[in-house]
Image (cartoon, grey):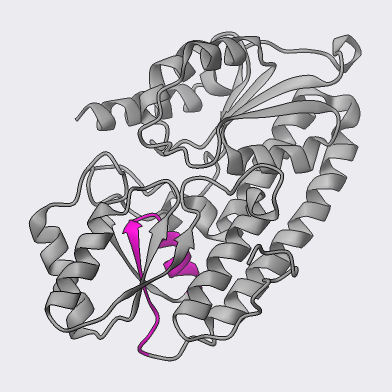
Amino acid sequence: MKRIIFFLIVSFCIAGGVFAGGRSESSASLSYPYSIVTTTGMIGDVARAVVGRRADVHSLMGEDIDPHLYRPTRSDVARMQQADMIFYNGLMLEGRMGDTLVQLARTRPVYAVTERVDQNVLLDDDEYEEAFDPHLWMDVRLWMNVVDVITDAVSEFDPAHADEYRARADEYLVELERLDEYVRGIVATIPDGKRVLITAHDAFGYFGAAYGLEVLGVQGISTESEAGIQDINNLVQFVVENRIGAVFAETTVPDRALGAVIEGARARGREVVIGGELFSDAMGPGGTYEGTYIGMIDHNATTIVRALGGTAPESGMNGKLSR
């Protein structure tokens, strides 16, 4: 219930302009680089691609951080209070940061990067009434909406460099188009009957819907809810009946429940391996290719396809994946 109420409050604030308002600056009075804070690394990576050196971008949640369970520290709050702009995912991904975001939006521009996505294309959150699956970054084409939201926001904040931001955004969108085409192409090579993606939690719904995979998670969309014995038994039965050969761990989710599925299947005569570790709610280590949004999706798609019997280059789309 609390989750539903907060969703409605945030929706009202956005509709009323609270989350896009606050402090305004003229380009003439700006000092560069100005400060942008994002909640997740995926949002931060888009922001960096758009602003270049005009702003310093800091992401609160780094590698291995689960945004569903994340609570901002005092230093995080202080950093946000000093920021010129704040971008967060929305759709209840950062539910535990709700009060903080509402308060900050009174004094500075705070944007939900998913605010323009048509609700008709959003997937429902089966755990919470009137809530949506927040993992939009798993569908590259949907995530392209975020580029435009950030571009328009920084262009409004710093209009003197709006053309520069738009040019960078257009270049980045071309890269995302190429990424989307790569994922579609390699997923299409997975043999019929093997296009089933089982992960530690249900973060890949948009990936499956966009690229043609059936997706099942041991846990639900939010990692706040733990898998019960019956959930695990049902998944074991599915794995055995459908002769699933590989399941996938995630960097931000403990694999105890996934291990229980593997052991349960083995007890019933079905050997299942972990096909790889995927980046679900956070990107890879900073400074690596997998620590970028493009590298994250390239890694996930390439790992999934190769483990499920499809054809994909070992080093990925750009030949940069770690082996």
Query: How far across and how far down the image is residue 37, in percent?
Result: 63, 25
Query: How far across and how far down the image is residue 94, in percent?
Result: 42, 32
Q: Which residue is drawn at 35% across and 62% down?
A: 199
Query: Which of the two residues, 119 or 319, is positioned nearer the viewer here?
Result: 319
Part of the protein shown in magenta: 193-211
Query: How far across and how far down the image is residue 51, in percent?
Result: 80, 35
Q: In this view, does 136 lie above or below 105?
A: below
Query: How far across and how far down the image is residue 245, in percent?
Result: 33, 81
Farthest residue, direction bottom: 192
Residue 259 lies in quadrant = bottom left
Q: Residue at x 82, y 24 (%)?
A: 158
Q: Residue at x 44, y 81 (%)?
A: 308
Query: Which of the two residues, 111 or 222, is positioned nearer the viewer here?
Result: 222
Q: On the picture, is 270 further left or further right than 200?
A: left
> Is residue 230 something one can see in this rendering?
yes
Q: In this view, does 44 lie above or below 180?
A: above
Farthest residue, direction left: 230
Total number of numbered discs in the rendering: 0
Residue 198 painted magenta: yes
